[in-house]
Amino acid sequence: MKVDDFDFDLPKALIALRPVRSRDGARFLVVKGADKLDSQVTDLPDLLESGDVLVFNDTRVIPARLSGMRRQAKMEVTLHMDMGNGLWQAFARPAKKLKAEDVIAFSDGLTARVVAKGMGGEVSLQFNCSGPELSRALKQSGVMPLPPYIASQRPVDAQDLTDYQTIYSKKEGAVAAPTAGLHFTERLLERLAAKGVKSVHVTLHVGAGTFLPVKVADTRNHKMHSEWGEIDAQTAKTINQAHAQGRRVIAVGTTSLRLLESAADETGQIQPFSGTTDIFITPGYKFRAVDILMTNFHLPKSTLFMLVSAFAGHDHMKAAYGHAIAQDYRFYSYGDSSLLFREDQL
């Protein structure tokens, strides 16, 4: 499909720069085919059934944005994928004059050597420490990597350390939050459990590539960046049992959905998974694992708007986003949410 087919006009005023103060108080657009219902995230238990399974991404965002110096030149680095032993894939700015073996010095003695240079500002960086020591150094030298559409309008501050993290985040490694999960509170999780809705956790370390613009004219020519994910055997079993019993699987966020679809075999069975995925979902994709998707509102011409269009129907999503804009829903990472029902199951 043409990338322009996923374009729409979004007023800048609708880009949320802060979340609502009560996480579960965000607005919630329920989309079921052509039907649309304006609701609130607090209503989620009323929209689900006992035996349904919510799949959460328990990745934890790290302070992945670093400022440093290469000789006398200032450098900005955003990490996006941990390759192990202190080696990271990253985006560097300005990258034009950066060469292999160059060393970038950050604060508090943290340095990184350029191992390789790729396209579009992508570099491989070998840090001078690894493991827990590197984790501590990043917390001292790095800042929370807010999306560019927020960071370009205001500075990152201490409140973002809490706001840009789900309450159930556990495994460090993401450089962007799984933002659908930002709406959950302990109170909401307790109400869902009381309803009989099951909760399981998977891990997908979201990379900075999620924010990269699609620069090609046709979706067939776009290449997704890889992200590391994991689904353990017990989680796979719980999801498979739910489907066998006629229950629904609800992905909390596009990251959970992409990982589940990557781990599903041809029969729809989820297999234990540990590795990278670069799955790119556009209209025409045949979903195997997920029945309902909870997700925020995405950028025009983004891979995520392509994904939701594939899931709930392109025409339905264009209409839903038109409704959301007309009703002043708040967009993107700190914005409102939606609950999408799979078009081919209606």
Image (cartoon, rainbow, N blue to C red):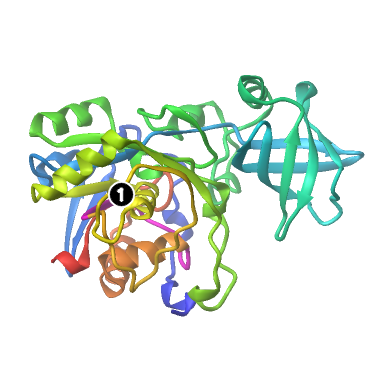
Disc 1, SS = strand
Q: Which residue is drawn at 38% across and 49% down?
A: 259
Residue 104 picture location, percent across and down:
82, 37
Q: What stretch is highlighted in magenta?
A: 291-302
Residue 238 picture location, percent across and down:
20, 38
Q: Does the magenta stretch include residue 294?
A: yes
156 vs 183, nearest the viewer: 183
- List the single residue furthest toward the right: 72
In the rendered view, tell whether residue 237 sits above or below residue 247. Answer: above
Which quadrant of the view contains residue 22?
Answer: top left
Residue 153 picture location, percent across and down:
58, 47
Q: What residue type is labelled 1?
A: Ser
Q: Does the magenta stretch include residue 105?
A: no
* Horizontal side, residue 249 vs residue 12: left or right: left
Q: Name the residue under label 1.
A: 337
In the rendered view, tell whether residue 44 sits above or below residue 29. Answer: above
Q: Which residue is drawn at 61% across and 20% down?
A: 132
How many numbered markers are drawn? 1
* Horizontal side, residue 62 vs residue 85: left or right: left
42 vs 282, nearest the viewer: 282
* Horizontal side, residue 168 vs residue 73: left or right: left
Position of the N terminus, as image quadrant, is bottom left
Which quadrant of the view contains residue 304?
Answer: bottom left
Determine crowd level at label 1: few under 14, some 14-19, many 20+ residues with C-alpha closer than 10 A: many
Residue 166 picture location, percent across and down:
39, 32
Q: Residue at x 48, y 58 (%)?
A: 12
Q: Which residue is drawn at 34% across and 36% down?
A: 232
**Residue 247 in sight here:** no
In the rendered view, tell whether residue 126 sits above or below residue 217. Answer: above
**Residue 136 in sight here:** yes
25 vs 267, nearest the viewer: 267
